[in-house]
Image (cartoon, helix red, strand yellow):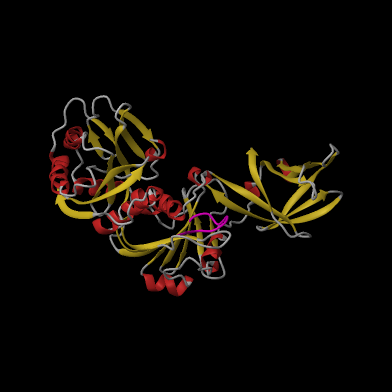
Amino acid sequence: MGDMRRIKKATPTHLFHASKPCKMRATLFIVFIICCAIADAQQQSYDIFSFTLPKGWKKERLENVMSLSTVNNQTKAWAQIGMIKSTASKGSIGDDFRSEWNELIAKQYKQYGVSEQPLGIDTQTVKGWKVQIGLGKLLFNKDTASVLLTTFSNGTRCASLRIMSNTTNYGKVLEEFIASIQLPDASSLQEKNTATTTKTTTSIPAATGFQFNTTNFDDGWTAVVKEDWVELTKGKLKALLHYPREEEKKYYSQYDEHVSVFWNLLVAPGYTNLREYQSPGYNHSYEPGLFAAGLLNDNTTKKDVWVALFSKGKSGWIEVIAPDKATFVQTFGVDNPNTYFDGWEPLLNLSRKNYFAVGESDLAGKWSSNFSSSTAYYNVYTGIYAGAAVYGSASSFTFGPNKTYRWQIAMGQSQPGGTMKVDQAKSNGSWKLLNNWQIWFSDLEGKPKTHNAYFSCFKGGRLLWLQDVSYGGYTAYGKVDK
């Protein structure tokens, strides 16, 4: 079925032929069975779902979804079930269903002519879960197929189930599958989530082994090193500069998906009852400002707060917690930004506060930095590739006993045609802190030099930033050993 089996997000579904919308009532009865069914010995589980795999169906775990499918190669009949991994609720079943339909149906199958709105919607409450169902149809391989999306929400978590088929012949199998499904009690799941995902945001610094773990800035902000973020506070405002994560290395083609992934990773675990959610959905700038915000209930304090999540360029993800929306808007000037909004500078300024002083005992060991770049050349008349120029450099400082150091740097470059050039330099001497933001070296490239210095933090370590006061840019050095 090609692309029909590629699902980006998690959502439950059921399927009946689109030409027979009267099946909706039967579907509602089936949804009731979902929450009341008794598990048998063949039950399997995925995320919050327990189920029995239909006999002869293929099971495949994809990204954020469990896919179950069958194909009859003779009649070309097919059916597919997608159990999509649960995510943070947007606060209501209506908001959750609209978001799931948009992401999992309307956007995913737009090229197959699926309607942006479901053909029919019905809602009920079962075992604490709000359940909303929508039916649609699409054209795949010149054949009409039906899609049924069922979304479950308890105000904290949202899950969906999607069923798709080009025939009604699998109706009995699908009903048996749905009858096998079990979901946990909605209230118990909510209590479990609340108890295990509270955020600790005290003003006590994490134990890091470095001398300085707090910085007081002239503009009133205070930065404190924590295990998973740098925590900023100013009056009733709080901001978390989240450390880099593996998920940031992935490419996200869709703005909504990019924001949603990190909202669910960084924000959702600490809060419940999302309301007034806002996000531009897209941004036209070269480096778009990724932004989402909403009114949430804090799991720790049980109070409502306005929470915004932001990232742009190399800022990293910044989570801002304000007592209310008005305070946030007054401080940062961001209020439900549209796709052309570009007033991100007040939020970007927060990213520059991952900034901590240097102590003498912090420097022992080796710190290194590496850089490389390349440029490809093509003939302006013929367009034929003419080779590449490659540049690279590596430098290091090794801080030894009695305030001694060794420094070395190597630089190399190659030009089209094979010409190569390598330069290197090294020296050793003594160093001293002029203050907690500057280091003096007795000999670098044949003369004494002073470097501005500070630390930035990441999970489990720090980067040492050095800037020759005679030049403009900083260079980041990572700790190699002690």
- Residue 214 percent coordinates (x, y): 53, 58
Q: In this image, 308 relative to 389: left or right?
A: left
Q: Which of 433 and 20 is in front in this view?
A: 20
Q: Please report the residue visible at 33 percent of the width from the left and 36 percent of the height from the top.
A: 66
Quadrant of residue 307 in the image? bottom left
Q: In this view, does 336 lie above or below 399?
A: below
Magenta segment includes 310: yes
Q: Where is residue 450 in the image (x, y as percent from the top left)?
A: 76, 56
Residue 144 appears in which quarter of the rendering?
Answer: top left
- Left or right position of 293 against 408: left
> How many numbered tags mark residues here?
0
Residue 275, placed above or below residue 6: below
Towards the viewer: 380 or 142: 142
Spot occupied by residue 451 in the image (x, y as percentages of width and height): 73, 56
Quadrant (top left/top right/bottom left/bottom right) for the N terminus: top left
Could you tell me if residue 308 is visible in this image?
no
- Residue 23 seen in the current view: yes
- Which residue is located at x 56 percent, y 66 percent? 217
* Residue range corresponding to the magenta coloring: 309-317
Q: Is the magenta stretch mostly helix, strand or loop?
A: loop
Q: Nearer the viewer, residue 447 or 93?
A: 93
> Residue 21's x, y, as percent?
19, 49
User: Is 62 left, or right, of 410 in this rendering?
Assistant: left
Quadrant that contains the C terminus = top right
* Residue at image point 66% right, 42% down: 364
